[in-house]
Amino acid sequence: MHVIVVGAGISGLSAAWALAKRHHRVILLERDVIPNPLGASGDHHRIIRRAYTIPGYTRRMTEGFAAWEELWGDLGAEHIARIGFMSFIRESGDHGDVYREGLVRGGYPFETLTREAAVARFPYLDPQGFREAFVSPEGGALLCLRIAADMVRWLRARDVTVRENATVRDIDTAAPSVTLGDGERLSADAIVVTAGAWVTQLLPDLAGRLASKRTYVVYLEPPAEFRAAWERTPAIPGVALNIGGYVLPPVAGTDLKFGAGATRLDWTADTAFELPDDAGERLRDMFGPLFRRIADYRVKRVRKCVYTFTADDRFFGTRRKAAWIVSACSGHGYKFGAAIGRRIADAVESGDEQALTAWLEARD
């Protein structure tokens, strides 16, 4: 088959990878460079972990981990820091508590730390900010920029046509074909749309089901006395402060990164947005109840980011005639990227929309 993939974030790259492995002819189109500087795939590192408030995604990570191992084998390199993850429980029923219950139900490994033990191991913690903690050896940090660079090299070496700065202005799902901004028209047997926050610009009728959002993260220099502790810290999802917070430690040449769902706002595709001069400090300070001396963490830079969101935090997939539209929503899609690519390839070959949607929504 001849397949056009629109959007070269991790889902698009992975779809192209999986299709090319099955000897399909693939054209991958990206409106910017790869990875897109505004896209969720364009950051230095992202969390991978088995910790979700939706049980189906906790179970899906078994396939997620396996897909990444397959990709590392193909690339001949592992772009992952296998540091595990850690979460905190502030009160019963918060994200950390739900994460841990999911691990218990699935029989997945973790170690519970008392407040005293956690502070002894990670002295940057404020003991007043949490009740207890737990650490899992699974997961860690995916090194996104290195992943994208090696995937593009792999694809081009296998005769996949990779086109950057190729903006799609129209998709004909019946023909099927796409029209680029300069008027060029490309036809294929199938189209895969993994356009992230730009998807509703291409398919406006999906706006009621998918929302484009903007946010930002901050990179920090911790106080010198805490640097060594941060360098041995696992990834931290689900910070128990009701901010949708997460932390990635400085690994493999990256910087300490804080992010929070509390910074999320609606975004219209291609609309510029500015941040206040103190945006980094504002985001940093949200973590004050958990980390000591938060004001002493120096802001190095902030990074803007856009992505899609669904009302129920689940991934999205649908079929329009010869086109497949997939969006790994709500900020946690990257860690499933390789697995999503394989599932898209399955759907393109089988035509089974129901199987793809069921897997993406993880309702089982």
Image: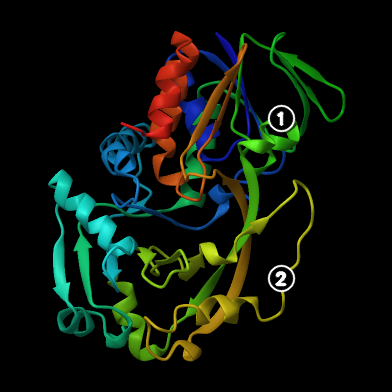
Instruction: Report how far apart the C-alphas of labels 2 and 1 lie in the structure.
Output: 30 Å
- Badge 1 is on which residue? 205
Please give the name of the residue rendered at 24% of the width and 78% of the height, measured from the top-left corner.
131
Residue 126 higher or lower than 106, as above or below: below
Residue 110 higher or lower than 158, as above or below: below
Residue 252 visible in rendering:
yes
Please give the name of the residue rendered at 48% of the width and 17% of the height, measured from the top-left corner.
353
- The local secondary structure at tag 2 comes to loop
Where is residue 258 drawn, in percent x and y? 48, 70
Residue 84 visible in rendering:
no
Q: Is 243 or 78 nearer to us in this picture? A: 243
Residue 18 higher or lower than 54, as above or below: above
Where is residue 217 drawn, in percent x and y? 56, 66
Circle on res. 275: 2
Quadrant containing the C terminus is: top left
Where is residue 101 drawn, in percent x and y? 20, 55
Within 10 angstroms of label 2, few (less than 14), some, or many (20 or more) residues?
A: few
Q: Is residue 115 left or right of residue 55?
A: left
Q: Is 310 or 246 nearer to us in this picture? A: 310
Circle on res. 319: none
Identity, as a three-letter code, of the amino acid under mark 2: Leu
Please give the name of the residue rendered at 87% of the width and 28% of the height, measured from the top-left corner.
182
- The local secondary structure at tag 1 comes to helix
